[in-house]
Amino acid sequence: MLSSLSSHNVIQYLQEAGLCSSEDGASADSELPQSSKNRNFRVNLSGNRTLLVKQEESAQFDNAPHELFNEWLFHELLCKFPVLGNNPAIASSVIHYDGANAILVREYFPQYQELGQFYRQGGVVHQRIATEIGSSLAALHRATFNRREYRTMLATAPQGMIRYQSYNPAQGIEVLAPDMFGNVPQAAFQFYKLYQRHETLESAIADLAYEWKPCCVTHNDLKLENILLRSGNCDVESKLVRFIDWEACGWGDPIYDVGTLIAEHLRIWLGSIVVDTSLRLEESLQLAMVPLQSLYPYLLALVRSYITSFPRILEYRRDFIVRVVQFAGLVLIRQQQAAILSQKTFNRVGIATLEVAKNLITIPQKSVQTVFGISEAEIIAPTTKLHPVPKMENKQNLLPIYYSKTRLRGC
Ligand SMILES: Nc1ncnc2c1ncn2[C@@H]1O[C@H](COP(=O)(O)OP(=O)(O)O)[C@@H](O)[C@H]1O
Ligand SMILES: [Mg+2]
């Protein structure tokens, strides 16, 4: 068993795995951005072919499948159900999986770049990109919605291993306990203090966890780094966007994916706010270099194209927009926590993000207006003209004998 890949042995590994030969003149470059859990290498081969080699650093070789197995399983799912492969945005480029060494190899598309990087380099937030993202994601959710065969396949575990039930990502932040003091930077204490101060936040997150309804195949990690955008010099036949990195995919709640996308775009606004101790929070938010208002058309295009491609979601989840906003808030909080643990910093941008996230979660109806600039009814009106949502049947005038929502707070 190989212990760990390096730029010195990655080519030898590919040759032994039969993925390239000595005539290929392979060269490895490790320019890829550092990932928190994987060691990634880009290997250039002759004939303009490039491979991405990922090895999961933190893979535990115990009784549970590691995350790269999930990415492999998604690839197998696409092979088994070619109808899903009609959606080029999710098409797999996986060519090799080695479970014993937690290594996965994919074709790399040099003509694409990360959407996050595109924006960081001043790329314009464009409605066409939003529309493609919304409709491509909806196509995956719609095609797998309530389909047992996909659910069963995603429950597969590698031989001899156990897979636990679907992971519910709607979780709050654990309470800061004395044994965590060593790992948490001083600056982050404020984050935990602010988080724990809001009592309504805790119960709203508990509600959200209860509202998490797994019903289709979901990506579960739609960061802007995991969406690739076609670059200018690529032929126009290629898909404009592609979703990559299916390590967290599973049987999940589609609203979580849409909420993550909204959170990722709100971060563009929050990351551009003016930070000065003399400014109140609202002033900082108002003075952002990328005003929230400039993102409205994009965010609207995203959710409307999603609903237009998957109109049934409104029948199934009448509170779709409100829940999207709440999940976006939750994702912002979890991202803050992850950033604190990895970068050991928490600054005024973090405080502003936490405040905004708290509002999204605890006053979602009002926050819909903040995020999209218009009301929930106005957002869905153009989509329901095309696909009217059937009216709810009138409830009979009977007293319920039990309340489905009755439960202990926090459970
Ligand atoms: N096919 C590809 N084309 C272009 N860039 C890619 C491709 N695959 C991966 N990348 C780049 O490599 C990074 C890491 O790949 P990813 O699968 O997201 O690994 P990780 O799980 O480590 O985040 C991506 O964020 C992206 O920048
Ligand atoms: Mg990634």
Image (cartoon, grey):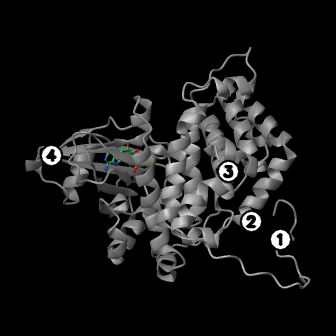
Q: Residue 210: which disc? A: 2
Q: Residue furthest top?
A: 278
Q: Quadrant of residue 408?
A: bottom right
Q: Are marks 2 and 4 in contact (CB under 8 Å)?
A: no
Q: Position of residue 197 (x, y in %)?
A: 85, 39
Instruction: Look at the numbered disc 4 and give the secondary structure of its residue.
Output: loop
**Depth-wise, is mark 4 or mark 3 nearer the camera?**
3
Name which residue type carries label 4: Asn
The residue where tag 1 is placed is: 405
Q: Residue 48: which disc? A: 4
In whole angstroms, how far apart are the C-alphas of marks 2 and 4? 49 Å
| Residue 53 in view here | yes
Q: Are marks 1 and 3 in contact (CB under 8 Å)?
A: no
In whole angstroms, how far apart are the C-alphas of marks 1 and 2? 9 Å
Q: Position of residue 181 (x, y in %)?
A: 75, 36
Name which residue type carries label 3: Ser
| Residue 183 in view here | no
Q: Quadrant of the N terminus?
A: bottom left
Is 67 placed above or below 369 here?
below
Looking at the image, which is closer to me, 127 or 246?
127
State left or right for residue 83 relative to residue 282.
left
In whole angstroms, how far apart are the C-alphas of marks 4 and 1? 57 Å
In whole angstroms, how far apart are the C-alphas of marks 4 and 3? 49 Å
Q: Residues within 10 Å of mark 4 (few under 14, many from 20)?
A: few
The residue where tag 3 is placed is: 375
